[in-house]
Amino acid sequence: MVRPVTYIHCVSLAAVTTIIVIILSLPRLSLSHDIYDDGEDNEEADPNEEFKNSPMTPAVAVSGSVSILPCNISISQSDDSVQLVLWYRDHVPTPIFSYDTRSGVYSRPKEWADPLILGERAHFSMSTLPAALVLNQTRRSDQAVYRCRVDYKRRTTTHARINLTVIEPVESVRIVDESGIEVVGVAGPYTVGERPSLTCQVLGGDPPPTVTWWKNGHHLDSPNQASPNEAHVTSAISTRVGDEPGSVAVNTIHLRALKKEDLRSTYTCKADNHELAPTKEAAVELDMNYGPERVEVRGLDGPVSAGRQYQVVCEAKGSRPPATLTWWLNGHMKKGVSQMTSRDVNDPWTSSTLELVVSPQDEGSKLVCRAENRELPAKTMESTHQLQVLYSPEVQVAAGSSLDLNNIKEGDDVYFDCHIKARPDALKISWSFNGVEMHQNVSAGVMVVGRSLVLQKVSRKQAGNYTCAATNTQGANTSSPILLSVKCESMVENQPSSVLYF
């Protein structure tokens, strides 16, 4: 009776010993889904219980890039080694990744990744310090608390937690004008004194992006901004529509009255939400239109001589786009022979050349050079020059107002007036009789008084053609001749005198 009892007891000890060995060797069994399926009996268990006292290490990655989840696997004894590394995520009780080296030092470690959570994106890197689980093409859904469990050959199992934050970078940045129309590259053209607004619209980004404005590389939104830039900004208001990653952040900048110096100023909107995420930006350059600052006419520094050709140049400066120049004389357009425009945006000018020939009738006329900006008709500017025309004398001879040239008799007194129009005034006046210059001869009854020729008691010999000539600095001219006919009386007996014409 005793032996059977003793036999049964011995068998029980062996079974207990076997169970203990199996339990102790469980961590070193090959990994499979069945091993980590705790079944319904463990459904209430907290998978974080064994990790609750382990350190928490923060990690940050940008969506689409690589995530590095560090896990310290260092050993302190030469005969120790890492046997198994298991990775868990949040409250998932089963591993999502394993790194198994139990096949031996000469065998390649076995990696396994949850096909639904990680797919083929994960691998365990031993080359980093510390070692790390590397996730390629990080997704926003990867953001979680990860747990790393390391089993050693001799050392006690270690645990670590890594809190991975995934940054969603800004998707796009665009600038729109007051009408809501997107502005690409160039904004405007604006006019001097205009007060435009530019709005920056930023799509996406988590955490929400910071949206700032910059002018020519200088930050405009800073409360400590220096006064030179404050002169160009009245306000910059940043708002966000919605809290989701796909929401829009808006920052509007209101510029003060623009000056010509603001031409080609670059306004840049920048959006960034993390130092690891790329900064997105959009920039526009201000274009401006403005009328001419100055119009000058050269080549008419003083009086001009009639009949002579002058090269007159008109130049308009400061207009953008360059001004169009036209010439006007007495309200009539004159065609210029050439027009040139500069290509220097910093010193815009237009030049037009007119070949001017004036006549005496243009004396006192106004020559106008008109500079027009086709985009700004109200900004037209003119330069007016009143002509002083120099011309040689225009000479005409006329009989005295009380004379009847058809009834001049011998013994009558005759006088002629020389009418002269000249600029400058005539310097010399002379009279001629039948082409021969006359000189004053009082005893012969020939006198020159001012611009008049007086013939006292004319005779038949003084009948003929009389002309007047005048000279000034522009030349000399002679009048058309005036014919003097002198009648003489012939005494016929018992009849009235008869008149003879010579």
Image (cartoon, rainbow, N blue to C red):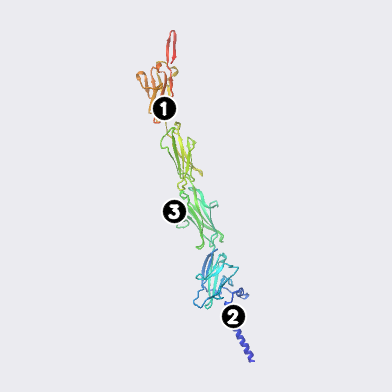
Q: Is residue 35 left or right of residue 281?
A: right
User: Which residue ends up furthest to the bottom in the rendered image?
Assistant: 1
Towards the viewer: 267 or 110: 110
The numbered disc on residue 323 is: none
Eyeballing the image, is 325 above or below 485?
below
Q: Which residue is mark 3?
A: 228
Distance, label 3 to label 2, CA atoms, is 80 Å
Q: Which residue is mark 2?
A: 22
User: Which residue sits at x=62%, y=89%?
Assistant: 6
- Give the x, y percent position of residue 250: 53, 57
- Give the x, y percent position of residue 304: 42, 34
Q: Nearer the viewer, mark 3 or mark 2?
A: 2
CB under 8 Å between callouts 3 and 2? no
- Give the x, y percent position of residue 129: 50, 70
User: Which residue ends up furthest to the top in the rendered image?
Assistant: 494
> Which quarter of the image is occupied by the N terminus?
bottom right
**Within-10-Å neighbours for mark 2: few <14, some 14–19, many 20+:** few
User: Which residue ends up furthest to the left in the rendered image?
Assistant: 443
Earlier along the polypeptide chain: callout 2 or callout 1?
A: 2
Eyeballing the image, is 37 above or below 233?
below
Type of residue at label 1? Asn
**Within-10-Å neighbours for mark 3: few <14, some 14–19, many 20+:** few
Type of residue at label 3? Pro
Earlier along the polypeptide chain: callout 3 or callout 1?
A: 3
CB under 8 Å between callouts 2 and 1? no
Earlier along the polypeptide chain: callout 3 or callout 2?
A: 2
Type of residue at label 2? Ile
Badge 3 element: helix
Badge 2 element: helix
- Give the x, y percent position of residue 216: 47, 54
Eyeballing the image, is 12 above or below 395?
below
Q: Which residue is mark 1?
A: 477
